[in-house]
Image: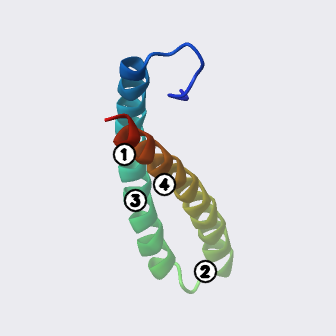
Amino acid sequence: VRPSRPGMGDAAAARAARKELARLERALDRLRVREAQLHGDLSAAATDHEKVLSLDAELRDLVAERTGLEDRWLELAELSEDAG
């Protein structure tokens, strides 16, 4: 949901931004938990080259997803500040 949709009132846009911020925060929390698990799994699998490669690929994907969510969170937080 983009809070700056044409025709959307300021109050509705702010409400949509807050709702998406909350959703993003929950998603970021889940990703942080999974990232910590992956780091632990990587340590435990240090001698299994194939497992390390697989876990590393998953970790890279997760970090990319987290970065995208954080960027969107920052964008929405800025919009929320401007609106309120």
Q: Earlier in the sequence, mark 3 or mark 4?
A: 3
Q: Earlier in the sequence, mark 2 or mark 3?
A: 3
Q: Residue at x 51, y 76 (%)?
A: 42
Which mark identifies residue 32?
Answer: 3
Tell me the element at label 3. helix
Q: Earlier in the sequence, mark 1 or mark 2?
A: 1
Q: List the residue tagged with mark 4.
A: 70
The picture places residue 51, in percent across and down from the top left corner, at 62, 72
Q: List the residue tagged with mark 1.
A: 25
Measure the alpha-carbon separation of dots 1 and 3.
Answer: 10 Å
Tell me the element at label 4. helix
Measure the alpha-carbon separation of dots 3 and 4.
Answer: 12 Å
Q: Nearer the viewer, mark 2 or mark 4?
A: 4
Q: Earlier in the sequence, mark 1 or mark 3?
A: 1
The picture places residue 47, in percent across and down from the top left corner, at 57, 86
Q: For this rendering, which residue is in front, 39 or 51?
A: 39
Name above or below for residue 28 compared with residue 26.
Answer: below
Q: Specify the amino acid type for callout 1.
A: Glu
Q: Specify the amino acid type for callout 4.
A: Glu
